[in-house]
Image: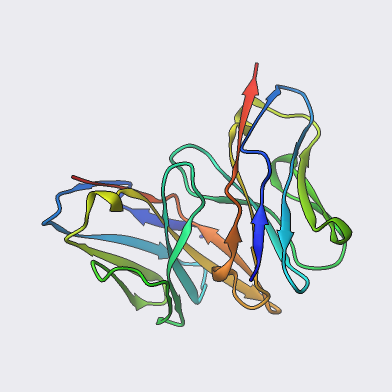
Amino acid sequence: AQSVTQPDIHITVSEGASLELRCNYSYGATPYLFWYVQSPGQGLQLLLKYFSGDTLVQGIKGFEAEFKRSQSSFNLRKPSVHWSDAAEYFCAVGLNTNAGKSTFGDGTTLTVKP
Amino acid sequence: DTEVTQTPKHLVMGMTNKKSLKCEQHMGHRAMYWYKQKAKKPPELMFVYSYEKLSINESVPSRFSPECPNSSLLNLHLHALQPEDSALYLCASSLTNRGQETQYFGPGTRLLVL
């Protein structure tokens, strides 16, 4: 069975600083990987996804993520954080046949300091 | 139309009430999902409908009853709920493209059971 670990429960960065959120997965085959963002009281918005091909994936809102098979990681990055990026971020790994059986990490809460 | 809508946004109900949550999408997606999300936790899959047929039921109590009247609509009927059922209920639909499936989430219904 697949699993996802987000090692950082809570991260605080200053506005304008760079950001990296970590995600490690365990899965026997090539994973499908997703990053979602959830603002308070809102649904999940897909930031980006990796299925195959180029290991550096560009997403919305200036985010990118890099798939590193050797490290079983799919870390999310942003070069300059905005106050509006404060939210909960979830990494998920999906089966190659049914995203509905995706396994979510426990999430990382991002706080942005002015 | 590129979104999943959910109504109502908020719902307060007593343990003897019967209510329904509604989800709608007009993106032509043939898979739809119900998730339950407690505060500061990742979403937990409840039900999956594929081509209007229930394909996954993650051992959800019978007080939750899903219904998929057509390919655009998904309902969740609630009856005799418990206070611990209070949560954010998220609907999602998914698009499969060359075997790669991507989920799109609605904003959720925040349910409080008194």
| Residue at x-position 64% and y-position 24% | A112
Question: Residue A61's quadrant in the figure?
Answer: top right
Question: Residue A28's quadrant in the figure?
Answer: bottom right
| Residue at x-position 14% and y-position 50% | B14
Closer to us: B86 or A43 = B86
Of all residues, the one furthest to the left in this rendering is B16
In this picture, residue A95 sits left or right of residue A39? right
Report x, y in % for residue B43.
48, 55
Image quadrant in which the C terminus of chain B is located? top left
Report x, y in % for residue A51.
76, 67
| Residue at x-position 72% and y-position 29% | A81
Question: Residue A107's quadrant in the figure?
Answer: top right
Residue B86 appears in the figure: yes
Q: What count of labels does the image hold?
A: 0
The way the protein has been coloured in the rendering is: rainbow
Report x, y in % for residue B71.
42, 77
Report x, y in % for residue A19.
76, 33
Closer to us: B98 or A101 = A101
Closer to us: B71 or B77 = B77
In this picture, residue B57 sits left or right of residue B22? right
In this picture, residue B45 sits left or right of residue A19? left
Residue B2 appears in the figure: no
- Eyeballing the image, is B95 above or below B110? below
| Residue at x-position 68% and y-position 43% | A7
- Eyeballing the image, is B3 above or below B94? above
